């Protein structure tokens, strides 16, 4: 059975998808739906729609996240997003270290760590993404990869109370493939053990570790008896009505 001491958390990463009309339909659906009271929900629309989403969200358990932020307060950084700007438009969370930014945009572990520290220091909570590629999984170094990505952050951040870790096996993102609940639990156990060795057992026990990688309305409830799977970071399914089913999958 999952650990009830850690509030169940479901994040929806819209990525570079949608329009004002589609974001409105998602927010309206969440506003009108009966959501599990014990679940914390965070949605991450594309940056142009953050303000609208924050202004029109009527659920006290739903929060708004950005998909990126920079590690400087302001300046000549064309196209980057300031943490202060995010707070100004109502975002309280940011997704950092997503595999698409690591692989496509070549963000290093050190850059992700620097962004994470800056966001936390300036009052924005972080969904920190980690995970291995298919080649790394086949090589049997999943936990080594996750440890390396976590260590870059723990070298800069000592207080993890506003960090949620999202384990996302790169090979399962957007492919329709998903790790089995047993495989995901095994990896989450390894992640928590590693965190205990670096940030301390007490903090590690409190950190929520999400699974991400082709989670949908049909398979979400198959993870609910796993003690170290504290929620999900959802991609494509967060754009669909089944997102509500994922939010309510622990009921």
Image (cartoon, helix red, strand yellow):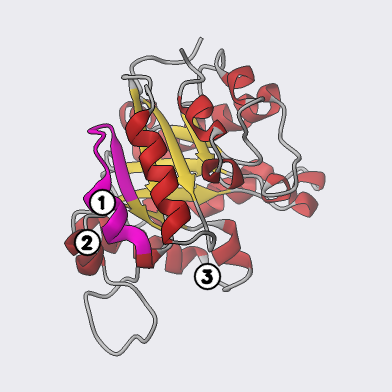
The residue identified by callout 1 is 54
Where is 31 relative to 27, above or below?
A: above
Report the Cα–Cα distance between label 2 and label 3: 25 Å
Residue 92 visible, this angle:
no
Instruction: Say which of marks 2 and 3 sits in front.
Output: 2
Does residue 170 appear left or right of residue 115 in this picture? Answer: right
Q: Do we see residue 35 in this rendering?
A: yes
Whether tag 2 and tag 1 are in contact, CB under 8 A, the answer is yes
Image mark for residue 109: none
Residue lying farthest to the bottom in this orientation:
76
Identify the residue at horizontal 50%, vertical 50% (top origin): 129
Q: Which residues are magenta?
A: 49-64
Gap between marks 3 and 1 measured at Cα: 28 Å
Q: How far from the left and from the top, in percent, is residue 15?
A: 52, 58
Return the residue at label 3. 107
Q: Which quadrant holds residue 103? A: bottom right
Q: Nearer the viewer, residue 150 or 101?
A: 101
Question: Which residue has dot 2 on it?
Answer: 89
Q: Residue furthest top?
A: 1
């Amino acid at each position: 059975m999952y650990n009830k001491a850690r509030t169940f958390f479901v994040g929806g990463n819209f990525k570079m998808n949608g329009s004002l009309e589609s974001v409105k339909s998602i927010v309206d659906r969440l506003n009108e739906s009966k959501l599990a009271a014990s679940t914390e929900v965070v949605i991450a629309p594309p940056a142009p729609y953050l303000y609208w989403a924050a202004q029109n969200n009527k659920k006290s358990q739903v929060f708004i996240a950005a998909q990126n932020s920079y590690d400087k307060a302001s300046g000549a950084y064309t196209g980057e997003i300031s943490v202060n700007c995010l707070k100004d438009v109502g975002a309280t969370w940011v997704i950092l270290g997503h595999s698409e930014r690591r692989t496509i945009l070549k963000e290093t572990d050190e850059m992700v760590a620097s962004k994470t520290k800056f966001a936390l220091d300036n009052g924005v909570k972080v969904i920190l993404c980690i995970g291995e590629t298919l080649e790394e999984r086949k090589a049997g170094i999943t936990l080594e990869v996750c440890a390396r990505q976590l260590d870059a952050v723990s070298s800069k951040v000592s207080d993890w109370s506003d960090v949620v870790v999202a384990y996302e096996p790169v090979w399962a993102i957007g492919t329709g493939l998903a790790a089995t609940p047993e495989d995901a639990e095994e990896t989450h156990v390894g992640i928590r053990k590693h965190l205990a060795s670096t940030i301390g057992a007490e903090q590690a026990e409190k950190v929520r570790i999400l699974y991400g990688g082709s989670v949908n309305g049909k398979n979400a409830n198959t993870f609910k008896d796993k003690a170290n799977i504290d929620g999900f970071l959802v991609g494509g399914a967060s754009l669909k009505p089944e997102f509500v089913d994922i939010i309510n999958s622990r009921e």
